[in-house]
């Protein structure tokens, strides 16, 4: 189809389109707002780093975690990051393999969100360990009988494939940037030259190899993506704790991950379109289609939520009763019902209407889904730990409750800011929308796209 379009355009028309794409989609320097945003993120990261240094110096006693609540918001944040990371496989793999052409402008957005999220998922787990050097023991003395080793293997594999799936489609764009490197500063030019790896696109076979490699990675990443969040759920489900002892956890986690990942892409779409004037490439139609996808994923997640709570509530085993009472009517009830209503039910209702699928409403809805998803992970982790099989007797009152300390909140905020900073710096250095794939869609041949009018 691209070849037919190319044949319908003259060489001059193709080069004109190519020039316009380069001028519009190549990265530019940040303005005052962009620089202020980077400063804010760096400051939050610095506070988080200071809090982590305090934790390294004094130990995990600076946190609110104790013998019973041995996992806190660090693990909640880990599960949240792993969930967000699945968006890479959803947009850049599943939709690409299904040849959903409208998703092309969104693939790189989803890939960089996935990479930054999985990087900080790995980092936050090291933070949770208290003794980071002991991470090496997992590789030196790991046992395959342990679900933790399964998680390490699948996260490492997913990160490697995600990096390749991000990098390979970048190579043609890097070559285009190298041909126009006079637009960029010296440090920027060196980055471009290094990562373009002397791409020689003249032989058409090189693009065939590239597309074949991307397709192979897209196929590989799907089972790994399903595996990463399924294995993460098994870290919980393989215990006997009330609230975690569930065979529903695998699909429950995966469906929730796809939902929050889609919401993250929508939020990114909105900000990028508004900040970089990308209305031609990220259109109202994209918001409408992504909203419909978000509704579908939310309905699937709603189904698994009903399964997760209805069955144990119906049986009401003694061990489950205290946990469910705390969620439904107890101390966690306001947060629990807020997450269910504002993080899932309201988005489904609003997005069913066409007016709710316009950019501004769907952006607000996506933020509600993302915030709700973070607190949902908090609710998965904390209440269960506070209701062990063995009654809490003869222990200090503070052990009966969990409240994160400022160090935990600072490190958590720093990790979230760090993930956003990675995405922000990527946008500053590299094209966030794939130039060569958009050019193919518009019927521009590779030769005309890579033609340098200044040569």
Image (tube, rainbow, N blue to C red):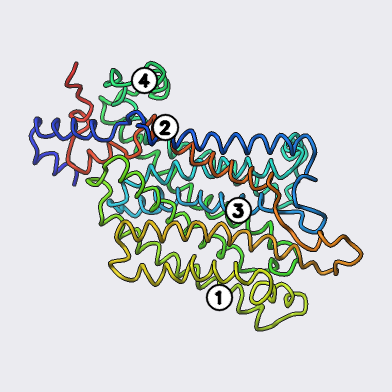
Residue 57 is situated, as x and y percent measured from the top left of the image, at 78, 34
Dot 2 crowding, Cα within 10 Å, few <14, some 14–19, many 20+? few
Which badge, 1 or 4, comes first in the chain's sequence?
A: 4
Q: Which mark is residue 198?
A: 4
The residue at which mark 1 appears reads as: 306
Q: Establish if 437 lies above or below 346.
A: above
In depth, the one of 6 and 179 nearer the eye is 179
Q: Establish if 350 lies above or below 105.
A: below
The residue at which mark 2 appears reads as: 35
**Disc 2 to disc 3, C-alpha distance:** 30 Å
Circle 4 SS class: loop
Which badge, 2 or 1, comes first in the chain's sequence?
A: 2
Residue 43 is situated, as x and y percent measured from the top left of the image, at 55, 35
**Disc 1 to disc 4, C-alpha distance:** 54 Å
Q: Establish if 291 lies above or below 209.
A: below
In depth, the one of 75 and 145 nearer the eye is 75
In depth, the one of 140 and 287 nearer the eye is 287
Q: Which mark is residue 79?
A: 3
Residue located at (42% from left, 58% from top) = 366
Which badge, 1 or 3, comes first in the chain's sequence?
A: 3
Of circles 4 and 2, the one toward us is: 2
Task: Evaluate if marks 1 and 3 touch, with contact meaning CB atoms under 8 Å apart.
Answer: no
């Amino acid at each position: 189809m691209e070849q037919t379009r190319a044949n319908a355009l003259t060489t001059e028309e193709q080069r004109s389109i190519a020039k316009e794409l380069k001028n519009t989609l190549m990265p530019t320097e940040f303005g005052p707002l962009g620089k202020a945003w980077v400063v804010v993120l760096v400051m939050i990261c610095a506070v988080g780093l200071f809090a982590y240094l305090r934790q390294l110096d004094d130990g995990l006693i600076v946190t609110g975690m104790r013998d019973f609540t041995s996992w806190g918001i660090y693990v909640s944040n880990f599960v949240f990051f792993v969930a967000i990371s699945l968006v890479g496989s959803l947009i850049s793999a599943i939709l690409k393999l299904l040849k959903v052409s409208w998703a092309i402008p969104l693939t790189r957005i989803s890939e960089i969100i996935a990479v930054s999220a999985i990087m900080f998922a790995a980092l936050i787990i090291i933070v949770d360990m208290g003794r980071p050097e002991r991470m090496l023991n997992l590789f030196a003395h790991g046992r395959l009988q342990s679900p933790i080793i399964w998680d390490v293997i699948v996260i490492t594999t997913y990160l490697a494939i995600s990096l390749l799936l991000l990098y390979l489609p970048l190579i043609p764009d890097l070559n285009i940037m190298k041909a126009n490197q006079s637009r960029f500063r010296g440090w920027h030019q060196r980055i471009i030259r290094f990562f373009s790896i002397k791409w020689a696109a003249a032989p058409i076979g090189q693009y065939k190899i590239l597309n074949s490699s991307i397709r192979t990675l897209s196929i590989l990443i799907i089972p790994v993506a399903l595996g990463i969040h399924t294995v993460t759920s098994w870290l919980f489900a393989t215990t006997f704790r009330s609230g975690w002892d569930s065979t529903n956890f695998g699909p429950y986690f995966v469906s929730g991950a796809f939902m929050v990942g889609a919401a993250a892409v929508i939020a990114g779409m909105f900000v990028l379109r508004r900040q970089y004037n990308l209305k031609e490439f990220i259109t109202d139609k994209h918001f409408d289609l992504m909203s419909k996808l978000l509704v579908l994923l939310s309905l699937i997640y709603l189904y698994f939520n009903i399964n997760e709570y209805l069955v144990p509530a119906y049986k009401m085993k003694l061990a489950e009763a205290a946990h469910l009472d705390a969620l439904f009517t107890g101390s966690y009830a306001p947060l629990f019902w807020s997450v269910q209503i504002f993080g899932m039910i309201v988005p489904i209702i609003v997005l069913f209407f066409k007016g709710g699928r316009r950019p501004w409403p769907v952006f607000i809805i996506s933020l509600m889904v993302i915030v709700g998803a973070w607190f949902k992970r908090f609710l998965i982790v904390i209440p269960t730990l506070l209701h062990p099989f063995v009654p809490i007797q003869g222990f200090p009152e503070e052990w009966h409750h969990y409240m994160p300390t400022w160090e935990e909140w600072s490190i958590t905020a720093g990790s979230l800011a760090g993930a956003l900073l990675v995405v922000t710096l990527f946008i500053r250095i590299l094209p966030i929308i794939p130039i060569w794939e958009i050019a193919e869609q518009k019927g521009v041949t590779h030769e005309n796209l890579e033609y340098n009018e200044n040569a």
